[in-house]
Image (cartoon, helix red, strand yellow):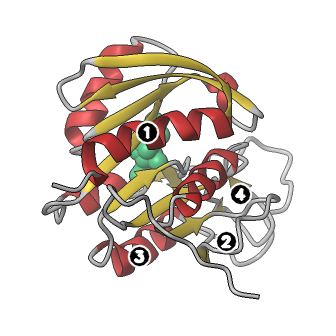
Amino acid sequence: MFVVIACDWNEIMAKVLITSGPTREYLDPVRYLSNASSGRMGRALAEVFLEHGHQVFIVSGPVEIEYPNGADVVPVITTEEMLQECQRRFEQCDGLIGAAAPCDYRPMTFSPEKLRKSGHTLAVELVETPDILATLATRKGSRWIVGFALETHDVHNRAMEKLRKKQCDLIVINRPAAIGAQTTEVEIADANGVILGNWTGSKEAIARRLYEIVAQRFLRRG
Ligand code: C5P
């Protein structure tokens, strides 16, 4: 059987790099810092780009879900590994979508031996991990970048700060309730901070909306 995947005639075939899922930062061989990101938003985005005939690379932290067969998936554990694998692929891609929820901190030291209870409090010192989008943005060139901003307070100002720092062309603003959920509520803003709209629905429906905006702005021929 032959499966012919054709790109829309008026769209440029793009190579898209998607970060997805959480990362983990280990304290000892069994304990780690992480979050409940499921990878569902990354999967939904991968599906819609593949449906339209684009090439998809996913760099994903540990997730239970399965990514579509057509995507080239690289599994990673830590934020540093996610950055390294993204750096390997970013140059050959036309666009980047940061749907991952990477850990912003890692324990300063890793204990190769499992930490044992001592009857006392245990202080863990954390250091910041690299920001993947901001690091890749320094070599952005003509590529487009879509970031996500998950905020609890001062939502718009903080999202705009991220948009500038990470040189995003679009930013998807969502809330903590989106983490690990089937549905989400988002606002999408452009590089000037103009809110293009707000949408509520399944992550698949939101991914299609986001795809339409990306396609219209960055994938149209001529
Ligand atoms: O976690 P935060 O709200 O700052 O994430 C904003 C955007 O930056 C998201 O697109 C996320 O994937 C990305 N990010 C990243 N590297 C990090 C933290 C977040 O690329 N270390």
Tell me the amino acid under the disc marked 4. Answer: Tyr
Q: Nearer the viewer, mark 1 or mark 4?
A: 1
Mark closest to the chain's N terminus, 3 or 2? 3
> Which residue does the numbered mark 1 point to in the structure image?
212
Mark closest to the chain's N terminus, 4 or 3? 4
Q: CA distance from mark 2 to mark 1?
A: 47 Å
Tell whether 161 sits left or right of 147: left
> Which residue does the numbered mark 2 point to in the structure image?
111
Tell me the amino acid under the disc marked 2. Answer: Ser
Tell me the amino acid under the disc marked 3. Answer: Gln
Say if 143 sits above or below 124 in the image: below
The answer to the question of whether label 1 and label 4 lie on touching residues, with beta carbons closer than 8 A, is no
Tell whether 31 sits left or right of 192: right
> Which residue does the numbered mark 4 point to in the structure image?
32
Please rate how many residues cluster around mark 3, counting C-alpha atoms within 10 Å: few if below 14, some from 14 to 19, many from 20. some
Q: Which mark is residue 84?
A: 3
Q: Nearer the viewer, mark 3 or mark 2?
A: 3
Residue 93 location (% of width, % of height): 33, 71
Please rate how many residues cluster around mark 1, counting C-alpha atoms within 10 Å: few if below 14, some from 14 to 19, many from 20. few
Residue pictured at 46% horizontal, 43% vertical: 211
